[in-house]
Amino acid sequence: MSMTPEFAKGPIVRAEGLTKQVGMQTDTLTILDSVGFELPPAASLAIVGASGSGKSTLLGLLAGLDMPTSGEVTLVGQSLNRLDEDGRAKLRAERIGFVFQSFQLLGALTALDNAALPLELAGRANARREAEAILRRVGLGERLRHYPKQLSGGEQQRVAIARAFATTPDLLFADEPTGNLDTQTGAAIIDLLFDLNREHATTLVLVTHDDRLAQRCQCRLRLAGGKVVEREGV
């Protein structure tokens, strides 16, 4: 994948002073407090911390799924603050992939249909052929016509990963990608994520409780009470 000029020489992700507050009946709750870091292209970052530390909130802000109370996120050279919702959705569709703990597959679609969906939405002429190739790459060549309910948890997560990587995104955000999997299956999913990271030079940003997954990442960010309390590589 060729790096486009807007971020080839700089960070692919930049967070500056990210703060997220929500109003309560009698007070204001600060979920994130002045979080900042930079991540270079093709790197991997694990965001770790206890439940309630702000990990998923940070991931949502980085992906433009939510907006901060203050601060700024820049992805692939574009400030999310300066884009409207349509602009942020376009950026996600063209440059970003997602993998969730709960797989988020469409139950009425086969594995092939699920993996092909983002390619079809992007107007790719060979969407199904490309989707089949990535499904075979993740070891699901014999499961193309199977529906999610016919697949194991590990197989469903492989479909989700294939779907996320199908458009060769610059960035992939993953929220607890091994959280619903047993240890052995989770380890296989971790290997797959990093294999695809190397093959496609896709930057990984992962929220995880899995120490094995966190240790595999080049960079780590630990949150507690909405603040960065430990950082490595960022």
Image (spheres, helix red, strand yellow):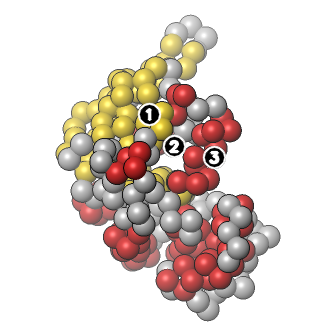
For image coordinates 48% across by 38% down, the residue present is 78
Disc nearer the start of the sequence (1/2): 2
Q: Secondary structure at mark 2?
A: loop
**Whole-percent x, y for residue 208 in the image:** 39, 53
Q: Quadrant of residue 18?
A: top left
34, 12: nearer the viewer = 12
- Name the N-terminal-most of marks 2 and 3: 2
How far is the residue under mark 1 from the one under mark 3? Answer: 16 Å
Count up the numbered dots.
3
Identify residue for label 1: 73
- Describe residue 1's horizontal placement relative to residue 48 as left or right: right
Q: Which of the two discs, 1 and 3, labels the residue nearer the N terminus?
A: 1
Q: In the displayed structure, would residue 220 be above or below residue 177?
A: above
Let me know if residue 4 appears in the view. yes
- Estimate the x, y position of residue 37 in percent, counting from the top left: 30, 36
* Residue at the limit of the structure toward the bottom, as seen here: 142
Does the CB distance between marks 2 and 3 fall below 8 Å? no
